[in-house]
Image (cartoon, rainbow, N blue to C red):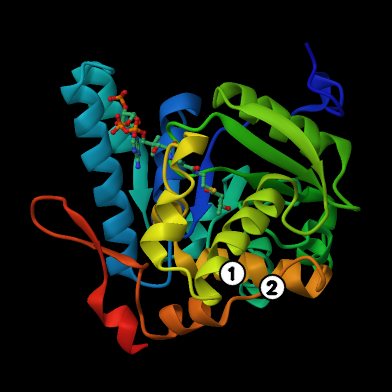
Amino acid sequence: KRPAGAPDKSLARPVTKVGVLGAGLMASQLALLFARRLEVPVVLTDLDQSRVDKGVAYVHTEVDKLLGKGRISADKANRLKASVTGSIDKSVFADADFLIEAVFEDMAVKKALFSEIESVIESDAILATNTSSLSITEMAADLKHPERVVGFHFFNPVAVLPLLEIVRGETTDDATLATAFAVSKQLKKNSVLCTDSPAFVVNRLLTRFLGEVFSTVDEGTPVEVADSALEPLGLPMSPFVLLQFVGMPVAHHVSETLHAAYPDRFKVSDNLARLIEAGKPGVYVWDEQGRQSVDPDLAKL
Ligand code: 3HC
């Protein structure tokens, strides 16, 4: 059955090589997923070689884990490792037909990256963005071919969570959207078509939810109390663990986007901003035995 809002699948173009722009937490997970499910060459890029090497090393480690669990054959593991490569030379993307960016959550950074890549790729190669909250239409606006830009928003951990938000910008054309849906099917994701509105659907709700939990802390409730009070909801992760898992800077950027769009409904927590400024990955630290406790430095911030 065709997903709601998806164009006719005959419009989809084949994907023979994937470019992943970024090599961080989400980007390296995406590289593995695309290589595993599409079985095409995947090239990762980032600002410098050490980030690229880290991204490729992550893929190799995860492939070894899949092999260890008996999920893939030794042959497939070798093919997967060989199919994911990294380069800081953007010319390697000249023959890529599907590129996805998962870099810093900042409109100017993403726009500059897309402009740079557009000068290298074919005119019909697709530019997908894993943005958590930013406007697809605005991201495409200055490109020569804005019709090729589409939102392709995954959830961490990418290998486990089945949802994919596909976002159509005002200029996204049917061939791009049809290709996005076809790729999603190959990736075995459950895709939903979202409107290009701030933070789409999931992050709109998640940010409101996490923001309210943060507010209780801003108003004086101890972190552990606010975090564990929600246990009866049966969430897979408590709110503050989830915040740390997703990455506090990302959560902060999303809340800024939402605050700008809907100032009455979304607040930006000063405490969250202070934690990020202090370089804290979250409110918790874990000892060697995996025991979790609130970072003692927090009291000083
Ligand atoms: N990468 C790959 N696989 C992972 C993984 C990771 N980071 N973390 C867990 N897994 C796999 C495990 O290997 C295991 O697979 P197996 O069954 O094949 O062995 C399976 O997931 C279950 O893992 P565990 O048994 O270790 O742990 P849990 O059952 O507790 O599940 C979890 C771990 C899936 C991470 C779960 O805690 C969870 O779903 N947490 C909530 C995550 C969430 O809400 N993410 C969305 C955040 S919002 C977002 O990403 C959008 C962005 O824009 C902000």
Q: Which of the two discs, 1 and 2, sits closer to the camera?
A: 1
Q: Quadrant of residue 72?
A: top left
Which residue lies most toward the right here?
170
52 relative to 119 in the view: left or right = left
- Circle number at residue 272: none
Q: Quadrant of residue 3?
A: top right
Residue type beneath disc 2 = Lys
Vertical position of residue 256 compared to residue 187: above or below: below
Vertical position of residue 158 compared to residue 68: above or below: below
Residue positioned 63% across, 29% down in the render: 184
Residue type beneath disc 1 = Ser
Q: Secondary structure at mark 1?
A: helix
1 or 2: tag closer to the N-terminus? 1
Most foreground residue, 242 or 295: 295
From the image, tell me which residue sits under label 1: 215
Residue 35 in view here: yes
Most foreground residue, 274 or 61: 274
From the image, tell me which residue sits under label 2: 267
Most foreground residue, 155 or 174: 155
Neighbours of disc 1 within 10 Å: few (<14), some (14-19), many (20+): some
**CB-based contact (under 8 Å), mark 1 and mark 2:** yes
Vertical position of residue 205 compared to residue 194: above or below: below
Percent of width and height locating residue 205? 69, 49
Q: Secondary structure at mark 2?
A: loop
Residue positioned 59% across, 69% down in the render: 215
In the rendered image, which quarter contains the N terminus? top right
